[in-house]
């Protein structure tokens, strides 16, 4: 899996209420949730997103707060396939895989990225290249089981495909 895009930089402790405010939880439709992604953080945040060509880069404890699965669904619905962070809240990290969102944890190396920089993420090889600066970051490869869930498009699709066999 390879992804390229512009960095959308976020700070520390971005909670699930910032990612998708509770008033929008009446829907489970990714497109509908995506239209309100990050509205609790910045009502105009979506103006910076280029679907399929944006990568979220966050600080510490991304996705803290409630365990709602709507948060990673909203990010995917906004057209973002990858979130790179210093660290993730554990329940968000697992929910991201389940919903088909790629979460990559890189610790302090997150400080290498700035808003608007172009990056390339190679999940298979475990590296991120900041094409704006030439700097490369290496991260541990995702476990095979988690990759299989992502390759299927999330846990529900993974289970459907396994049951169909």
Image: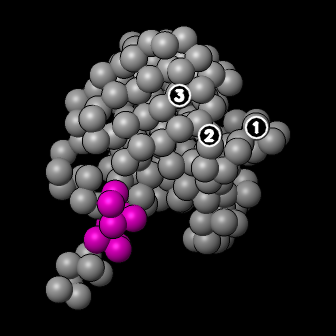
- Which color scheme does this rendered protein use? one colour
Identify the residue at image location x=55%, y=55%.
76
Q: Image quarter for residue 32? A: bottom right
Q: Residue at x 34, y 57 (%)?
A: 150
Left or right relative to 93: residue 164: left
Q: Is residue 106 visible?
A: yes
User: Is 153 in the magenta?
Assistant: yes
Q: Are marks 1 and 3 in contact (CB under 8 Å)?
A: no
Separation (CA) of disc 1 from disc 3: 16 Å
Dots 2, 1 in contact, CB < 8 A? yes
The outermost residue toward the bottom is 164
Q: Alpha carbon of mark 2 to alpha carbon of mark 3: how far? A: 9 Å
Q: Are marks 2 and 3 in contact (CB under 8 Å)?
A: no
Among the two numbered marks 2 and 1 on one chain, the one whose residue lies closer to the N terminus: 1
- Dot 1, how many residues are within 10 Å of its Cα: few (below 14), some (14-19), or many (20+)? few
Q: Regarding mark 1 in the picture, which secondary structure is present there?
A: helix
In the figure, 27 relative to 59: above or below? below
Question: For numbered disc 3, what is the local secondary structure?
Answer: strand
Name the residue tied to disc 3.
119
Near mark 3 (Cα within 10 A), the count class, few <14, some 14-19 or many ≥20, is many
**Span highlighted in magenta in the image:** 150-158
**Residue of label 1:** 48
Task: Out of 49 and 32, give the one closest to the viewer.
Answer: 49
Task: Looking at the image, tell me whether mark 1 or mark 3 is earlier in sequence order.
Answer: 1
Q: Quadrant location of residue 55? A: top right
Q: Is residue 95 visible?
A: no
Mark number, residue 124: none
Residue indicated by mark 2 = 54
Q: Which comes sooner in the sequence, label 2 or label 3?
A: 2
As helix, strand or loop, the secondary structure at mark 2 comes to strand
């Amino acid at each position: 899996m390879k992804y390229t895009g512009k960095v959308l930089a976020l700070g520390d402790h971005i909670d699930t209420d910032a990612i998708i405010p509770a008033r929008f939880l009446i829907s489970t439709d990714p497109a509908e949730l995506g239209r309100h992604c990050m509205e609790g953080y910045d009502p105009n945040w979506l103006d910076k997103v280029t679907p399929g060509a944006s990568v979220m880069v966050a600080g510490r404890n991304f996705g803290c707060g409630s365990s709602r699965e709507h948060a990673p669904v909203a990010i995917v619905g906004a057209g973002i396939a990858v979130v790179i962070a210093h660290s993730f809240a554990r329940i968000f990290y697992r929910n991201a895989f389940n919903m088909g969102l790629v979460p990559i944890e890189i610790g302090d190396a997150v400080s290498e990225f700035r808003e608007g920089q172009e990056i390339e993420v190679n999940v298979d090889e475990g590296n991120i290249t900041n094409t704006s600066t030439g700097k490369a970051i290496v991260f541990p490869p995702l476990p095979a089981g988690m990759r299989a869930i992502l390759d299927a498009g999330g846990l529900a699709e993974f289970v459907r495909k396994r049951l169909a066999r």
